[in-house]
Image (tube, helix red, strand yellow):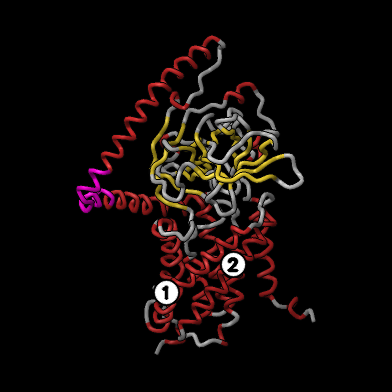
Amino acid sequence: MFRFLKNRYFWIMFAVIVISLIAVSQTSAERDDLTIAEEMVRKAYTPLQRGVSIFRGHLKKMEVLFVSKQSLIADVERLEGELAALHLENQGLREYRHESRRLKELLEFRDHNLTNMRMIPAQVIARNPNTWYNTVTIDQGSDKGITRNMPVITPRGLVGRVSSVSSDHAVVTLITDREAAVGAMVQETRVPGIIVGTVNGKQLKLSQIPFYSEVQEGNRVVTSRFSVLYPAGILIGTIAEISAESEALTKTATVIPAVDLDQIEEVLVVTNYMNPASEWGTLDSGDPESRNEVPAP
Amino acid sequence: MRYAVLFFIIPFLSLFLESTLFGRFTLRGVGPDLMLIFVVFYAIINGSRRGFSYGLFCGLLEDLYFGRFIGMNVLSKGLTAFVIGKFEDNVFKDNFLVGFAGVVMATFLNFLLMLVIGLISMPHLVMDGYMLVDLSGQLFYNGLLSIPFYIWYYRSARSGLLREPRYRG
């Protein structure tokens, strides 16, 4: 019955399975440094992926030649309309900004607004082909001062954070990744919650919303002041559906990300964000992002 | 040349195409697993033991590229190839449906193995209906691509770049 135990091949397979399982558990957490083998594999791909990205950029420029004049005129008119509306909104916001700065100075608060931060633009050169992780590779790395856990955004909203870095590229874990967690709040009602990725990687969940809080479909979700890794006020997405959690005093909302993460091509890496809470020493295990076990950059 | 194509060009190109070209043409966010497709073809043509080794090699390359949970793809691809390779002597390899059926079975098996390893190693992993959507998307995509790829692979293994010594005149 146990004749297979005498089979040398059985023991080889058994050893491979055990070693692999140990390796999986040892590498399940994010690491500061890549091994030489990982570095070599990624470095082999980066120039090719960058080449594809550049080629795609040239193709896009050529596409303009085939677009009809009417369609271009319609686009320009639409964009001019949007620009006028944004100019108007900007005037009002500028006033609020000065008011906010003045009040912060009076109260000796530090200004952590996104407009004061330094950002490095980067191109997305590859996407993770595996459905288990939601990551993209960008064409800027430690040579340009990028380090792990730096926030990554687009003008439309939050993208994710840098999860590993090489000299000439970096991997960004998207907010839709199942392991991602972001301290968030509903912009209209200031209700706090935690944004987590979902298994399908296309929607987000805002969990831990107090049951009696006023949250509605269409509300905007932004990063919270208590987020460890991300500057406050960055748009994450819009609430699409709200459901009560069974046997709990909290609600959960489905959030559609503000950024189309399947199509992003350019991102901005925020390089000088320092979480104010980290200066006060209040980051502890109760923080929403403690699940990732990552300190503020 | 055969070994250079098998052990370097095919896995390298598979991962490269998955991360660039197919990353833009996903079905509800799901792309094909080209590496799995070629591991399955290798196992069908060469049997379970060699398939297992090839699966381990390709899985390791994939894991090193991803940089996390190293061993997950090693195990899932290795064991999947081992199981599929068991059919080596019982199928008509010249029929393209063999490649199709093998890839569909392997996609399902690979998913199950990844899920089991994931449940062991990821404490926050929660199973839900989206996983089945991902699986069905990948079954469709892999199955579709397996037909032309198997026709090329089989012909190449018989009389082309990947020709097996047993077929040599």
Give the residue at mark 2: B110
Give the chain of mark 1. Answer: B
Of all residues, the one furthest to the right in this rendering is A1
Q: Where is residue A97 in the image (x, y as percent from the top left)?
A: 45, 19
Crowding at label 2, few (<14), some or many (≥20) Cα neighbours within 10 Å? many
- The answer to which of B53 and A203 lies nearer the viewer is A203
Residue at point 46%, 85% (across, down): B95
Residue B22 forms part of the magenta stretch = no
Q: Where is residue A232 in the image (x, y as percent from the top left)?
A: 54, 29
Horizontal side of residue A30 vs A129, given as left or right: right
Q: Position of residue B62 (x, y in %)?
A: 52, 59
Give the residue at mark 1: B149
Three-letter residue code for mark 2 = Asn
Three-letter residue code for mark 1 = Phe
Give the chain of mark 2. Answer: B
Q: State if disc 1 and disc 2 touch (CB < 8 Å).
A: no
Secondary structure under badge 1?
Answer: helix
Choose top left, top right, bottom left or bottom right for residue A222.
top right
Q: What secondary structure characterizes most of the magenta part?
A: helix
Choose top left, top right, bottom left or bottom right for residue A75.
top left
Choose top left, top right, bottom left or bottom right for residue B51.
bottom right
Q: What stretch is highlighted in magenta?
A: A60-74
